[in-house]
Image (cartoon, helix red, strand yellow):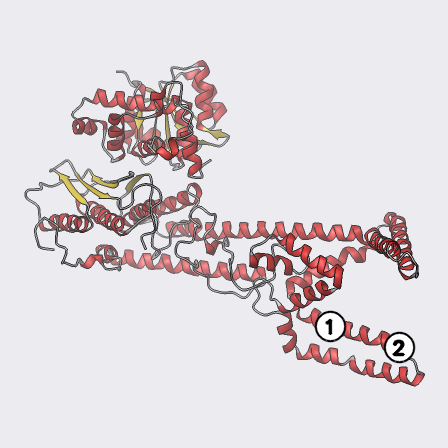
């Protein structure tokens, strides 16, 4: 970095332009060893907590624990959109077909299909019901889908598990002798009636055994809960006995009337069957309506409770990760005021950005897409590494392109230098986005220096900042005098003015 | 000028004690309160020159105090003091009538300075508030469309000079430094800042709310 001042050295490759975090190196070497060790401690603990939390959450949801997934695209729009993926706000958008948990009326098949093809679950449900009424095909399709499609969060389908459930299959096969016996007896009596009844019953029983053994825990509980009110219908409260009996009686009479109407042969072929169907349906509604209502309400309650529990878990994890961890560290380091102040400040910043900007702090190594985020990162990093408070003010915001990344990098260099050398108690960073250009001011009230008699370090700053800016068509000015601090002014023209700036890459 | 009489409103006793210590002998602290109702009552009773007001109080925002006191004692001046980064809270207190906003990280010496300035009737802009205001009054044609102008259209925008002053404050310049940078007197800087404060308080510019909601702040 020895050459003098014009900065128009296009052929010269600045090592700091590599994709490595060039500042991190110098920063780490500037800090004391104990501090680096401390940083590693914090990171390790944070990782540990995160792991424990993920396991706990997955256990709670009855899933296999897995590592948190990265957002599928780097520009995933959770900046203003609620939670980042690891906080549970992420849903697969065109992932594998899964039975839905959140849009579940029965098995979640319709909800899953709807999520998969991005339509309203109600539409899919209507489709299934219509197909079921007109041909029975819908019902069969639904059941097969329930068996074959894994539930959300599960890796295997029920059918897949059945194939490996040898004990269940053996249990089911143990019903085969019953069928055989019924056939033998039936043929001996010269009547197919017995086998005609027993066979379907056995098939159904075997199927139920297999399903019950292999359905997911959650769904088993769900079915059990759905059945509970049904069981209670006949058992509970003496007062409800009479109304129940009455209701069942009315239902049975209506249904029986419908069946009779259906079975009666008549000339008026259209009217009777229709009336029969209506009566059967009415009977079913009268008899089972309350139960069905109960089940529906239960499902809604369950869904809300789950959403609430997840939200609470996220909140708890966040507080644990950040605030409690920091408090614990502060207690342990009560004798090191410098580090306590730094910890408190870092934590305050993080909590503030979460509470007020509603965004999670970008994790290390993630590339900032927006200028304001990048500036905030300078604040955070410099405060952490150099223990000097940085006051940032950002007016406006825009997406970063290569030029603006250079601007940010130069600004970071200037800030780091101010923190390291000026001796000022704090550094002010002001960034303003205007339609045609972006300006960045880094000011300290430190010792300042005489620009005409600079020591090598200072010139290094000026050249690396100036050079970086010049290569991207920007300008850099350094104002300083002894005793009055230093201000670095960086300006970069925007490539595409106004709003519709295309992505830099 | 005699020592300004100062009243503290903050829900943290520890913080009030800290501010008291930092202000030291430079001001006379005539009382403190930890919530809206006691604050309104005691301020009416003691009639301080300046109230140092936390933006967030248990039973509501600091603007509730400003609005309640203003009715009977319009001469009492308020300086908002907060750690809050949320612009809509800060702007709300300013629009209610506070004469300035500083962050709690301010040094004791700067705080005394700010109190004296407010006591003298001037406005106090921290870099952060200057940034908020520049943002709120950004000349964005797309934004300006469809906004009903104030009864006085001048209230809806900052002059070039005011913008320059705010920009320098946002850069971390003290009033004195702003003055020498722009080759004007400190008094002129103060009058520019007061003008900006007036615009902030009086502008019916819906942009302020629009700006806040654009940032998902409301």
Q: How many marks?
A: 2
Q: Residue at x 20, y 46 (%)?
A: A414
**Chain under label 2?**
A
* Residue A485 in picture, x, y percent from top left: 16, 38
Q: Nearer the viewer, residue B16 or A140?
A: A140
User: Which residue lies under the disc numbered 1?
Assistant: A207
Is A369 placed left or right of A20 in the picture?
Answer: right
Q: Residue at x 28, y 55 (%)?
A: A35
User: Which residue lies under the disc numbered 2?
Assistant: A194
Q: Which image quadrant for residue A444?
A: top left
Q: Are marks 2 and 1 in contact (CB under 8 Å)?
A: no
Quarter of the figure with the C terminus of chain A: bottom left
B66 versus A208 height, above or below: above
* Residue A452 in picture, x, y percent from top left: 6, 42
One can see residue A300 in this view: yes
Is A23 placed left or right of B69 in the picture?
Answer: left
* Residue B8 in picture, x, y percent from top left: 39, 26
Tag 1's secondary structure? Answer: helix
């Amino acid at each position: 970095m020895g050459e003098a001042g014009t900065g128009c050295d296009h052929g010269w490759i600045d090592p700091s332009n590599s994709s490595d975090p060039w500042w991190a190196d110098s920063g780490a070497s500037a800090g004391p060893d104990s501090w680096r060790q401390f940083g590693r401690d914090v990171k390790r603990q944070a990782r540990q907590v995160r792991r424990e939390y993920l396991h706990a959450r997955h256990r709670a949801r009855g899933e296999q624990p897995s590592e948190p997934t990265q957002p599928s695209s780097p520009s995933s729009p959770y900046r203003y959109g609620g939670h980042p993926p690891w906080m549970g706000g992420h849903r697969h958008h065109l992932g594998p077909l899964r039975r839905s948990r959140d849009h579940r009326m029965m098995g979640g098949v319709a909800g899953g299909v709807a999520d998969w093809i991005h339509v309203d679950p109600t539409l899919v449900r209507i489709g299934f019901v219509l197909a079921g009424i007109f041909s029975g095909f819908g019902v069969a399709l639904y059941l097969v889908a329930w068996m074959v499609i894994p539930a959300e969060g599960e890796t295997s389908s029920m059918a897949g598990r059945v194939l490996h459930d040898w004990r269940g299959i053996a249990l089911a096969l143990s019903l085969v002798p019953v069928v055989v016996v019924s056939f033998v007896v039936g043929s001996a009596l010269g009547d197919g009636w017995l086998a005609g009844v027993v066979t379907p019953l056995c098939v159904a029983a075997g199927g139920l055994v297999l399903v019950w053994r292999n359905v997911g825990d959650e769904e088993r509980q769900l079915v059990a809960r759905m059945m509970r009110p049904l069981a209670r219908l006949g058992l509970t409260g003496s007062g409800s006995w009479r109304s129940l009996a009455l209701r069942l009686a009315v239902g049975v009479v209506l249904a029986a009337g419908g069946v009779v109407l259906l079975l009666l042969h008549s000339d008026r072929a259209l009217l009777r069957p229709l009336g029969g169907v209506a009566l059967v349906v009415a009977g079913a509604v009268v008899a089972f309506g309350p139960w069905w209502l109960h089940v529906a309400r239960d499902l809604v309650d369950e869904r809300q409770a789950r959403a609430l529990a997840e939200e609470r878990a996220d909140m708890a994890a966040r507080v644990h990760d950040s605030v409690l961890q920091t408090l614990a560290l502060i207690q342990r380091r009560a004798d090191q005021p410098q580090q306590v102040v730094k910890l408190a400040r870092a934590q305050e910043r993080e909590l503030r950005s979460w509470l007020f900007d509603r965004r999670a702090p970008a994790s290390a190594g993630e590339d900032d897409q927006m200028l304001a985020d990048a500036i905030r990162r300078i604040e955070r990093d410099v405060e952490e590494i150099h223990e000097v408070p940085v006051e940032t003010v950002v007016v406006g915001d825009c997406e970063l392109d290569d030029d603006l990344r250079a601007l940010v990098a130069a600004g970071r260099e200037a800030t780091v230098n101010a923190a390291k050398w000026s001796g000022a108690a704090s550094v002010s960073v002001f960034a303003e986005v205007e339609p045609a250009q972006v300006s960045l001011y880094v000011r300290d009230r430190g010792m300042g220096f005489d620009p005409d008699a600079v020591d090598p370090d200072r010139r290094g700053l000026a050249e690396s900042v100036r050079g970086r800016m010049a290569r991207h068509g920007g300008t850099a000015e350094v104002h300083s005098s002894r005793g009055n601090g230093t201000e670095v002014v960086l300006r970069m023209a925007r490539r595409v003015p106004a709003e519709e700036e295309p992505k830099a890459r | 000028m005699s020592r300004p009489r100062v009243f503290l409103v903050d829900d943290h006793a520890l913080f009030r004690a800290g501010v008291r210590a930092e202000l030291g002998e430079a001001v006379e602290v005539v009382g403190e309160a930890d919530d809206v109702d006691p604050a309104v009552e005691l301020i009416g009773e003691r009639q301080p020159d300046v109230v140092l007001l936390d933006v967030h109080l248990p039973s509501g925002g600091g603007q509730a105090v400003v609005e309640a006191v203003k009715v009977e004692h319009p001469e009492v001046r308020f300086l908002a003091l907060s750690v809050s980064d949320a612009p809509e809270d800060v702007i709300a207190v300013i629009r209610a009538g506070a004469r300035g906003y500083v962050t709690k990280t301010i040094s004791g010496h700067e705080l005394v300075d700010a109190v004296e300035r407010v006591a003298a009737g001037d406005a106090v802009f921290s870099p952060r508030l200057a940034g908020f205001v520049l943002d709120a009054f950004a000349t964005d044609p797309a934004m300006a469309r469809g906004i009903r102008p104030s009864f006085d259209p001048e209230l809806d925008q900052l002059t070039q000079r005011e913008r320059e002053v705010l920009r320098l404050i946002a850069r971390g310049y003290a009033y004195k430094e702003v003055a020498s940078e722009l080759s004007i007197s400190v008094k002129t800087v103060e009058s520019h800042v007061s003008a900006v404060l007036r615009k902030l308080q009086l502008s019916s510019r819906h942009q302020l709310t629009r700006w806040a909601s654009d940032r998902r702040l409301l």
